[in-house]
Amino acid sequence: MGDMVVIGELAPDGTLTKLSTEVATLARSLAEAAGVGATAVIPVAGADAAAAELAEFVTSVVVDGGAGPDATPSQRAAVVAAGLDGADHVLIPASPDGRDLAGALSALTGWGVLANGVAARWSDEGPVVVQSAFGGKLVTESAFIGGHGIVTIRPNAVTAEPLGSPGTVGTRATQPAGTIAPVALLDRIVAENAAVSIDDARIIVAGGRGVGGPEGFGLVQELADALGGAVGASRAAVDSGWIPYSQQIGQTGKIVKPQLYLALGISGAIQHKVGMQTAETIIAVNRDPDAPIADFADVLVVGDLFDVGRAMLVELRSRSG
Ligand SMILES: Cc1cc2nc3c(=O)[nH]c(=O)nc-3n(C[C@H](O)[C@H](O)[C@H](O)COP(=O)(O)OP(=O)(O)OC[C@H]3O[C@@H](n4cnc5c(N)ncnc54)[C@H](O)[C@@H]3O)c2cc1C
């Protein structure tokens, strides 16, 4: 069995993404189980600081300058494909760019993709990838036929664990392999008034249809501020135009894993649950004691969310003052 390659990726500000450290941790444990090596490749020229950070999680990191800082995911895929060098499996973050890269890499190599994995273990045949289907109602396990494959891993599926001592960092500049229909990057637009990101938030206060309108999110925001957290939402609130899609949690939104998830006026539909069920503590405020969220919340406060939320605010502010 050949080595395992894991792709490291950068955030728009040039720092390493947390998801890269999670996927690197998984690649390391799979490689250990398989008795092969694991190498992280960051296909971005000059990503030395990010590489040093990634070396905390995997024994060997290579910055491949064959792709420039503004390369598109498909251009990066052409560089990764040319540098695979005896590797049999590639693990990639299931981020928007990572998904693009995985698709292009599949086209260039002819390898299959197991997308959006939430876990993986090693078997004699290769990685067995766990995926969640039908909004979490079904969990599947899949493996590759033929010994090669590409796996994308969802955020917050794995806990990043650093190595005891950091790995090595090297550089190279691989000539891209093959051609793939170019996708031009026309512009990068920074969202105006962007809300605090929910991706890595330790505390999330989320609002659903129960908040009643955009003004209802004022209380949600105040609670998030008082707790030092970020604001999330159900799809019902996003579809109503009360809050941007970037804050949606669930099957067609983001998967989050905060220490505390405070859900206000959210019923707990399965498609929402799959995005937040791994939160360490879930506190729900709902006026319906039989709402589905009662089945999996650690604490259910039955009452009007505005009464309960304002009382919480008073208490939080009295404690911080
Ligand atoms: C393919 C597909 C993908 C989907 N993806 C997602 C997804 O990613 N994320 C997602 O969230 N949903 C998703 N959904 C939608 C999902 O099925 C639910 O419709 C949605 O989660 C409901 O949002 P909600 O809980 O805010 O609203 P509701 O289900 O309407 O619940 C509102 C809750 O608020 C309570 N409430 C009302 N007023 C108050 C008050 N004043 N005080 C206290 N409680 C109050 C009610 O008792 C109720 O429990 C998806 C659906 C499909 C079919």
Image (spheres, rainbow, N blue to C red):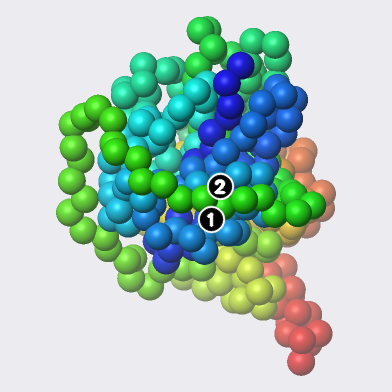
Q: Residue 263 at x, y = what percent?
A: 66, 55
Who's the residue at 56% across and 72% down the image?
A: 221
Q: Quadrant of the C terminus?
A: bottom right
Residue under label 2, please give it. 61
Type of the residue with mark 1: Ala
- Dividing the picture into quadrants, the one containing residue 104 is top left
**On screen, residue 111 above or below 180:** above
Who's the residue at 56% across and 47% down the image?
A: 61
Type of the residue with mark 2: Val
In depth, the one of 129 and 269 nearer the eye is 129
Who's the residue at 40% across and 60% down the image?
A: 46
Q: Residue 145 at x, y = what percent?
A: 52, 7
Q: Residue 265 at x, y = what percent?
A: 61, 54
Measured Cα–Cα span from mark 1 to mark 2 = 6 Å
Specify whether tag 1 is near ligand 1 (CB below 8 Å).
no
Q: Are marks 1 and 2 in contact (CB under 8 Å)?
A: yes
Q: Is residue 258 visible to the viewer in this orientation of the structure?
A: yes
**On screen, residue 50 above or below 255:** below
The circle on residue 51 is 1
**On screen, residue 113 above or below 281:** above
**On screen, residue 117 above or below 22:** above
Q: Residue 299 at x, y = what percent?
A: 81, 53
80 sits to left or right of 123: left
